[in-house]
């Protein structure tokens, strides 16, 4: 799946989500349902999430320049972080309002809530259909696409909860359930936002990609017959699906054309076993003073 096709799917998802957002917001006001309004609020964050994802995908496809040698891939991470911070703020606002309504329950037009939430659920399923291939297959490591996908998936689950709750309120007139559902939706939003925030900050702090061990990479490289030692090893994420590495490799003194073969073997190993596609390797023939610990850079 190409970046252009993903952008088109995102555009359709944005349009569909925005339409349902308007319907749920009006319906929530008319039916006096905080649960439906919380679902509309989640829809609002979905619109922002999808829009930022579309923009990030468009910008990150721009080529590298002499002043931005890694290109614009990090835009993806800033978009994911912005999405999640917005989601977190919205969730806290919903929790505050839910607490107030829990103490003073208000009557809700349950049948209207049920009908509008069903429309929202149908729309969310349509958006999931647009995004599932991008999020789970071609771009399964793309944090930005993943954050947008989980925004919508969480809203889908929220719509189901609102529908069930509306049915119960219609049958029992137990209107306090409206604030309980709103609080549960907010809790799901907080959990999802927290996870994306942690992942985004890990990448911005040049953390080792999840699922990769420095010790394992070092072990695999030293296992190559021509490599005697590995030190000054650094592995980080340029963005959520592009990994980079730099290291010093101790090898026997030899001709340059022989060293080229060693370099090719090391790069192939890194790409095939660890998905590290951008590596910078410095060959040395004399051991340096490294003690094997990570390099301590002075600020």
Image (spheres, helix red, strand yellow):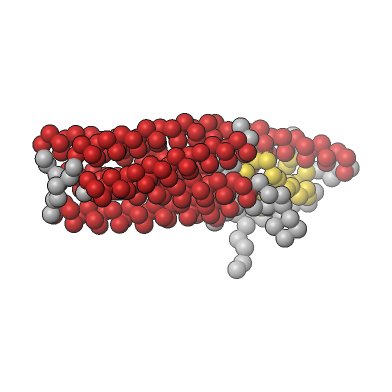
Q: Is residue 183 left or right of residue 277?
A: left
Give the total number of marks visible in the rendering.
Answer: 0
Instruction: Name the one closer to the observer, 128 or 204.
Output: 128
Q: Where is residue 169 in the image (x, y as percent from the top left)?
A: 15, 38
Residue at image position (48%, 43%) is 14
Quarter of the rendering containing residue 39: top left
Instruction: Name the one closer to the observer, 240 or 152.
Output: 152
Q: In this view, does 225 lie to the left or right of 74?
A: right
Instruction: Name the one closer to the observer, 97 or 122.
Output: 122
Q: Position of residue 136 (x, y in %)?
A: 51, 33
Residue ranking furthest to the bottom = 299
Residue at image position (19%, 39%) is 110
Q: Is residue 45 left or right of residue 223?
A: left
Quarter of the rendering containing residue 217: top right
Q: Where is residue 238 in the image (x, y as percent from the top left)?
A: 62, 49
Locate the C terminus and report the quarter of the image it occupies: bottom right
On screen, residue 61 above or below 289: above
Locate the N terminus and report the quarter of the image it occupies: top right
Q: Position of residue 72 (x, y in %)?
A: 64, 52
Residue at image position (28%, 53%) is 94
- One can see residue 4 in this view: yes
- One can see residue 198 in this view: no
Q: In this view, does 88 lie to the left or right of 149?
A: left
Residue at image position (62%, 47%) is 58
């Amino acid at each position: 799946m190409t970046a252009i096709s993903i952008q088109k799917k995102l555009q359709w998802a944005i349009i569909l989500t925005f339409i349902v957002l308007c319907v749920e917001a009006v319906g929530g006001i008319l039916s006096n349902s905080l649960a439906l309004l919380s679902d509309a609020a989640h829809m609002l964050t979905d619109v922002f999430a999808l829009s930022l994802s579309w923009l990030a995908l468009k910008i990150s496809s721009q080529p590298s320049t002499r002043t931005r040698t890694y290109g614009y891939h990090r835009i993806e991470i800033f978009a994911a972080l912005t999405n999640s911070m917005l989601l977190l703020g919205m969730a806290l606002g919903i929790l505050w309002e839910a607490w107030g309504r829990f103490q003073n329950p208000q009557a809700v037009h349950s049948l209207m809530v049920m009908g509008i939430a069903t429309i929202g659920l149908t729309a969310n399923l349509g958006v999931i259909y647009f995004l599932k291939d991008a999020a789970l297959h071609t771009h399964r490591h793309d944090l930005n696409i993943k954050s947008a996908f989980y925004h919508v998936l969480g809203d889908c689950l929220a719509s189901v909860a609102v529908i069930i709750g509306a049915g119960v309120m219609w049958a029992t007139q137990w209107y306090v359930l409206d604030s309980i559902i709103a609080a549960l939706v907010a809790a799901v939003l907080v959990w999802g936002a927290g996870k994306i925030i942690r992942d985004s900050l890990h990448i911005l702090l040049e953390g080792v990609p999840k699922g990769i061990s420095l010790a394992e990479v070092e072990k695999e490289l030293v296992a190559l017959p021509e490599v005697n030692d590995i030190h000054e090893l650094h592995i980080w994420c340029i963005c959520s699906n592009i990994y980079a590495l730099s290291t010093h490799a101790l090898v026997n003194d030899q001709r340059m054309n022989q060293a080229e073969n060693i370099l090719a073997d090391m790069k192939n190993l890194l790409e095939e076993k660890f998905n590290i596609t951008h590596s910078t390797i410095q060959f040395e023939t004399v051991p340096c003073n490294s003690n094997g610990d990570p390099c301590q850079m002075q600020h």
